[in-house]
Amino acid sequence: MIPHCQLPSHIATGPHVSPFVSHNEAGAPYGDHRSEDVHVPANPASVPFAVAPSTDKGEVAMGEPRKHTTTPYVTGNSVLAIKYKDGVLMACDMLGAYGSTKRYKSVQRIIRVNDTTIVGASGEISDFQYISNLLEELMTQDFCYDDGCTMTPSEIHAYLCRVMYNRRNKMDPLWNSLVVAGVDKNGKEGNKSFIGSVGMLGTSYTDSHVATSFGNYLSRPLFREFQRDDMSLEEAVSLMQEALRVLFYRDKTSINKFVLAKVDGEGVAISKPFALDTKWDFKAFMNPSKHAVGSW
Amino acid sequence: MSRWSPYDLNGGTCIAIGGEGYCIVAASTRLSTGFSILTADKSMILEVNDKCLIASAGFDGDRSQLHKVLTFRSENYEHFHKKPMSCPAMAQMLGNTLYYKRFFPYYTFNLCAGLDDQGRGCVYTYDAIGSHERVGYSCQGSGKDLVQPVLDNQLKAPSILELPPKVAVTSLSQAEAIETVKIAFSAASERDIYTGDAVEIFILTPEHGVQKEILPLRRD
Amino acid sequence: MSGVGSGYDLSVTTFSPEGRVFQTEYAGKATDNGVPCVGVCCKDGAILAVEKPEETKMMLPNSNRRIFTVSRHCGMAVPGKLPDGRQIVSRAQQEAENYKRFYGETIPTKVLTDRLANFCHVFSLYWHLRPLGSAALTASFDDDGPHVYLSETNGVSYRYYGIAVGKGRQGIKTELERMKLDQMTCKEALKAVCKCLIKQRDDSSNKKFEIELAWISEETGREFVRVPADLAKECEAAAKKEIEQEEDDDSDMEG
């Protein structure tokens, strides 16, 4: 019998090392019935990607806290929102990314909650769909009260803050950054715009403009410079388009398919998906494969 | 990959100074996470009533929760006792509230400040799990290392170490104390990236109740 | 203790020798003696109407509601004992919400009303429970169009073109049978329903009445809502006028 080879575990992977492995040693639970030339790892736990339920480190071990979402799977990127003269605008793209893969390209990440409120989300898409359901139930309950009033954007924001904070307290966070935007029509001095944000830890704030994830770096500076609460709809839309364009140029996980939503005194309007004109004819972009042999 | 943490540090500095017949509570309004600014205008001071204020630095999620709990309890107290909660009572309750979560703490660093029964400024300073002490002045948050020594030096308050103990309120006049707070904040905003944008200054006096002033700071 | 069946009406868990459960029948009387409620199904929707006597002049109008919203597509009128009725309503709201959460679709009315009937029925199975003194008159609009169901306290649930419960129900039912409900729109039927309710009023008492009206139709966007106050008032006035007209005609003929 060949003595057991002490290769570092990260090298001992492929079939070529099979001669060094004794099939009959303890730790090879399914080695017995297989033919000799099939590679069976001696200790599945030491081999990357091999799964043995009893030894998998991802499983719940004694004395360790239960594991919840430790990393998001399908994610949406930046959500932008700004106030303007008559209300608020919100925009984001429609990508649902699986890591760096552009996996889903028609994900609606802005939802209408009621006649005065919309909610946009970046982060885990499944968690957002759960939140959408919560909001729909909340609005149905509101409808059933039949008392002639509906929840205001700031109330919905407060509700979402509690939901997010409550889940982080359970060490089971909803992996999202949410933006709530809308118009409060109950105010004494006419309609009042509202934009609020809440993160997965329950960190919340309200402002005249908000951007989540990458947008906080790329779009917020534009907003700080150009956004005014009394700007016209046209100005606001073109500012928003400029912000989206910058995001598309510089954010790898974004696509040129956007949705723009508006809330004003008349109600909620969410646009059809649209694309922006982009300019790529910079010299270095003209023939990117020129110096890459074998590329097309 | 590092484990997910339920905590964050959102920065900000707060100062409270008690004097004879006044109390000053001030806090910056910048909310940050990591190296980004989330908003330039978020208050971290809770006005409990016109005799007591609470300023909390640290993690914003816990701060909102803590302030909600305290508001609720102080309202309840008012309904039961037919009087607003005194600053020393609120100080004790804040300590208990924090200690109740000893093993999953509110990651907040608080100052409870206001006027006591004699109308004298009183300041309580806390750690995240509720241990506290009555002092004449104090400072919490991301800029505390910069500000606290300045206060120690400038406020001319009797030392807490002195025997027999003296009331540790500053001997400065109200105007001088406000000026000191302003200087402290503009100095802190020069060196601490988490302190900036603006500072809210609340002045409590038995005669005028709560007055508020806003001082703009560096926005970079 | 005389007569067949006497002594068998104290328990909900004991049959009489003729095979009746008196307690559930008595519970049914609670709805029979309660305020009149009408539900009709028209070609474009469904209507619920309740006539309530003014209990005291000091009560604010519209504060003693008997029509409740269960879900966006569904509402309910509760005759009989109002507190018991509210139990049914809150159960209905839960059922509707749970169904939506689980299947992602609105609850079919048949499923909802069957579940409510089951819910009511349970109260007639155990000695320690009292049957509910109410019922669920449900109006809805789902994928199969408009519906009116009545789920009763004894546990049965049927679908109707039009149904009335409570005081004066026989008279109203007769009136409903004369109408061509399946050819009427909700708007047309509103006045007719008001007429039925007003007609069976006891004229001898000088009580004031309030008619509560709610509907669901294509016009309301398939959402269950109260009939707008001005339209409700208009219908009630028009109904009153027609009745007076008819009475005048009758007396003319007699004369």
Image (spheres, helix red, strand yellow):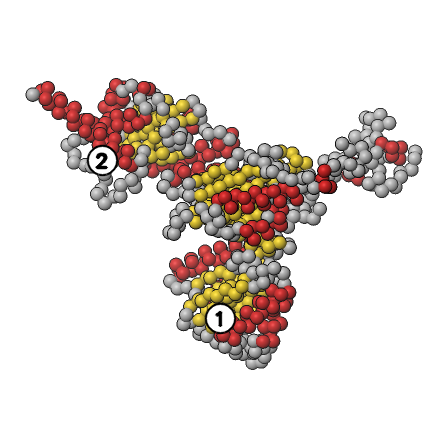
Q: Nearer the viewer, residue A50 or C147?
A: C147
Within 10 Å of disc 2 (Cα), the crowding (few <14, some 14-19, many 20+) is few
Residue C209 seen anywhere in this rendered image of the structure: yes
* Depicted B162 relative to depicted A271: above or below: below
* Depicted B104 relative to depicted A29: above or below: below
Residue B139 rendering spot, x and y as whole percentages: 58, 67
Q: CA distance from mark 2 to mark 1?
A: 63 Å
Residue at the spot 87% in from the left edge and 32% down from the top edge: A16
Residue highlighted by disc 1: B23
Residue B157 rendering spot, x and y as whole percentages: 56, 77
Left or right, residue B198 beside residue C7: right
Query: Could you say which quadrant of the image residue A44 lies in?
Result: top right
Residue C116 seen anywhere in this rendered image of the structure: no
Q: Amino acid at mark 1?
A: Cys
Helix, strand or loop at disc 1?
strand
Depth check, mark 2 against mark 1: the one in front is: 1
Residue at the spot 68% in from the left edge and 36% down from the top edge: A101
Within 10 Å of disc 1 (Cα), the crowding (few <14, some 14-19, many 20+) is many
Residue highlighted by disc 2: C209
Disc 2: which chain?
C
Q: Amino acid at mark 2?
A: Phe
Query: Could you say which quadrant of the image residue C194 lies in?
Result: top left
Residue C65 rendering spot, x and y as whole percentages: 31, 38
Q: What number is the disc on residue C244?
A: none
**Same chain for the residues under marks 2 and 1 in the image:** no
Residue A144 rendering spot, x and y as whole percentages: 40, 37
Mark 2 and mark 1 residues within 8 Å of each other at the beta carbon: no
Disc 1: which chain?
B
Q: Quadrant of the N terminus of chain A?
A: top right
Residue at the spot 10% in from the left edge and 22% down from the top edge: C252
Q: Quadrant of the C terminus of chain A?
A: top right
